[in-house]
């Protein structure tokens, strides 16, 4: 499996080398700038929707675990990075406006990001993928925004919750800043990662889920829709995987991500990572309601 | 000789009515920016008055969406739409139109509610640095569009209107609004929503262009307008202007009068989750209102009015129910309604859950 990827990568690189004979291979080969984070655990506001007794409730806080070292791209994939994938005919061509050199790549869907990850994995012989929601939050550290609604709304009539969501979204609107800015404009977080929660939101690999809690707060049923993925940034949102330019949802209610982009993580143990995702439900222990 | 007498008679006639009007009590109104409407009596026991308003033409660059798209706008009193003026049938409207010297173009006003001289357009054309005063009698009740119509100085009428120069006059019956059976109808709040189509030219890469002056924007904008496909259709001059923190507040049990105008294009307002209890679709109060409408129609170049009592709390979108215009071009406003939910009117019996496995066939 890995061997096949390496052969493919070698073939791709030699093709490039032939085409641009004068340039040394090292220049053409994409080498992501990665930051390695140590394994750890942290309290995390679970992604997805939660309900109890047929009523929507605020998502629980869970104890999330990052079981191994996590290598995360220091900055978001740039327009120039993405363009190389397009030139290799491995990534879809997207809106011209989205690809300004020197800026993070924006107007990309989850599917585009996935295509880029596959291409980069082939090119490098290493496995790159989008982070899970938990991994993103771990990497974002102090930049992670938990703007969950107060839990006392769990007991009011649902229109009060609706109005509270509306008001929260209205507050978000004022933070919008229109144009994408050059890499690094939003500074580094405590992990040295650039532009976390700037004005470009990032796709994650986590599927949108609906979870039913029992009286003790344990998840007793989950339905997942992997046509919708969690998007992280200044606030968390859920987006259909083919959307490149986020807009507000039903009746223009809600504040959409300003731009959709992504960064990848290097997966040194894909089987372990998958195990981690499947173990997600079991970690819904440390509920604090 | 005969001709001279006739002229004298005509002159006398012309001066008699205004001479009487001149003696009426006067009231000066401070206009407020939409969606709000200046304080007014819904029904009045006072006699007719001269109601004074002041409108200032203001040419300025504005931002019309969250992406920062700029428009060389033209306005009355700085707002799009222009402010709503409220009088009663039989009142005289006396408008001072000011065109500051800082403007670049002449402006005037055609009041659909006034009679003669292009609704006043022929008598009100003022150049930058001039002002004019026009008085007209409010003889018909309803909500009526007014707009700039600067004819005779170049082909600019549609451009001025598409740049924001329209508003509404509401002429109320002296004894207020009534239903079909002549029962009085009252409102706790009134909101004025002016729907506006904008035409912003794009550059070669498809991005919206901005221009330094109105004159610079003229030729490209007119070319685009002639295709009749707006780039923006908005309430209150900007995508999202009446949403979020600027959503229109109301409470359960309150009755709201929604006045809606569109000086150019047809619209089909719909209140998502609500209704039009009483709707004057063509906007004229001498006709009985229709009741219980789901969606109504605003003819381009007119205003309509809908009365609705909110029965449930929550967020209500008020949209042009051409949903492409509502969601892609911007024609969405929100009401934010507080109060207690009625389970009788609506209850979710079962929350979303996995579809149960089919019972085995027996």
Image: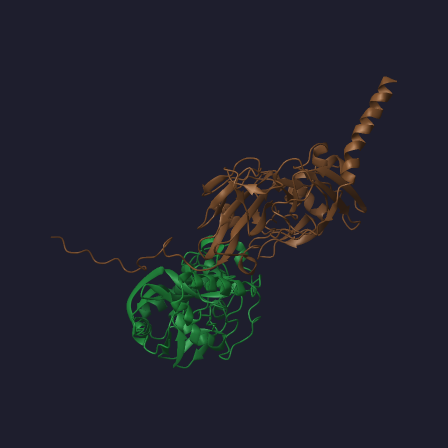
Chain colours: A green, B brown
Pick whichever, A57 or B203, lies toward us: A57
Q: Examine the rendering and report whether any part of residue B358 can be seen.
A: yes
Left or right for B183, reference B145: left
Report x, y in % for residue B263: 61, 40
Give the residue drawn at x 55%, y 64%: A103
Q: In the figure, residue B241 lies in which quadrant? A: bottom right
Instruction: Answer above or below: position of A161 versus A68.
Output: above
Left or right for B257, reference B45: left
Report x, y in % for residue A215: 30, 72
Report x, y in % for residue B164: 65, 46
Single out the residue that lies furthest toward the left. Answer: B362
Report x, y in % for residue A193: 50, 75
Pick whichever, B311 or A105, lies toward us: B311
Single out the residue that lies furthest toward the top. Answer: B2
Pick whichever, B179 or A54, lies toward us: B179
Left or right for B70, reference B9: left
């Amino acid at each position: 499996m890995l061997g096949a990827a390496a052969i493919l990568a070698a073939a791709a690189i030699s093709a490039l080398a032939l085409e641009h004979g004068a340039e040394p291979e090292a220049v053409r080969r994409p080498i992501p700038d990665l930051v390695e984070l140590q394994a750890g655990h942290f309290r995390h506001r679970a992604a997805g929707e939660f309900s109890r007794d047929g009523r929507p409730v605020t998502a629980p806080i869970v104890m999330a675990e990052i079981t191994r070292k996590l290598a995360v791209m220091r900055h978001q994939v740039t327009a120039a990075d993405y363009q190389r994938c397009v030139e290799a005919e491995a990534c879809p061509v997207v809106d011209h406006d989205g690809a300004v050199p020197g800026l993070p790549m924006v107007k990309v869907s989850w599917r585009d990001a996935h295509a880029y990850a596959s291409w980069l994995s082939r090119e490098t012989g290493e496995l790159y993928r989008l982070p899970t929601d938990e991994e993103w939050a771990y990497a974002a550290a102090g930049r992670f925004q938990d703007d969950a609604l107060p839990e006392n709304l769990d007991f009011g009539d649902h229109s009060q919750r609706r109005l509270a969501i509306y008001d929260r979204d209205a507050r978000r609107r004022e933070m919008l800043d229109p144009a994408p800015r050059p890499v690094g404009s939003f500074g580094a977080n405590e992990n040295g990662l650039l532009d976390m929660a700037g004005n470009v939101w990032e796709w994650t690999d986590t599927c949108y889920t609906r979870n039913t809690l029992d009286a003790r707060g344990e998840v007793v049923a989950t339905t997942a829709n992997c046509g919708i993925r969690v998007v992280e940034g200044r606030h968390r949102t859920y987006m259909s995987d083919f959307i490149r330019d986020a807009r507000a949802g039903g009746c223009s209610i809600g504040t959409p991500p300003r731009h959709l982009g992504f960064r990848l993580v290097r997966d040194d143990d894909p089987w372990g990572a998958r195990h981690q995702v499947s173990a997600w439900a079991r970690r819904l222990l440390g509920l604090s309601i | 000789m005969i001709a001279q007498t006739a002229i004298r008679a005509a002159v006398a006639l012309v001066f008699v009515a205004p001479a009487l009007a001149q003696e009426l009590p006067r009231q000066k109104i401070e206009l407020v920016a939409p969606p709000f409407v200046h304080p007014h009596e819904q029904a009045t026991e006072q006699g007719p008055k001269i109601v004074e308003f002041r409108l200032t033409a203001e040419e300025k660059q504005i931002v019309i969406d969250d992406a920062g798209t700029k428009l060389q706008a033209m306005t009355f009193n700085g707002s799009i739409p222009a402010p709503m003026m409220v009088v009663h049938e039989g009142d005289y409207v006396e408008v001072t139109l000011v065109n500051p010297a800082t403007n670049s173009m002449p402006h005037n006003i055609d009041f659909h509610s006034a009679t003669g001289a292009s609704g006043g357009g022929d008598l009100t054309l003022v150049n930058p640095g001039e002002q004019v005063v026009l008085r007209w009698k409010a003889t018909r009740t309803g909500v009526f569009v007014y707009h700039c119509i600067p004819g005779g100085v170049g082909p600019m009428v549609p451009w001025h209107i598409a740049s924001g120069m329209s508003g509404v006059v509401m002429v109320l019956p002296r004894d207020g609004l009534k239903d079909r059976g002549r029962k009085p109808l009252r409102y706790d709040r009134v909101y004025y929503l002016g729907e506006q189509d904008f035409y912003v030219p794009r550059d070669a890469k498809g991005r919206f262009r901005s221009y330094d002056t109105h004159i610079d924007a003229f030729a490209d904008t007119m070319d685009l307008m002639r295709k009749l496909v707006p780039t923006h259709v908005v309430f209150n001059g900007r995508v999202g202007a009446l949403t979020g923190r600027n959503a229109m507040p109301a409470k359960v049990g309150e009755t709201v009068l929604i006045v809606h105008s569109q000086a150019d294009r047809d619209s089909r307002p719909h209140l998502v989750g609500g209704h039009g209890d009483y709707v004057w679709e063509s906007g004229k109060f001498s006709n009985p209102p229709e009741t219980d409408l789901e969606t109504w129609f605003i003819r381009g170049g007119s205003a309509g009015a809908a009365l609705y009592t909110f029965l449930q709390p929550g967020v209500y979108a008020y949209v042009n129910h051409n949903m492409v215009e509502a969601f892609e071009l911007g024609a969405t406003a929100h009401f934010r309604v507080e109060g207690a939910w009625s389970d009788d009117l609506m209850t979710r019996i079962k929350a979303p859950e996995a579809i149960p496995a089919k019972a085995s066939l027996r």
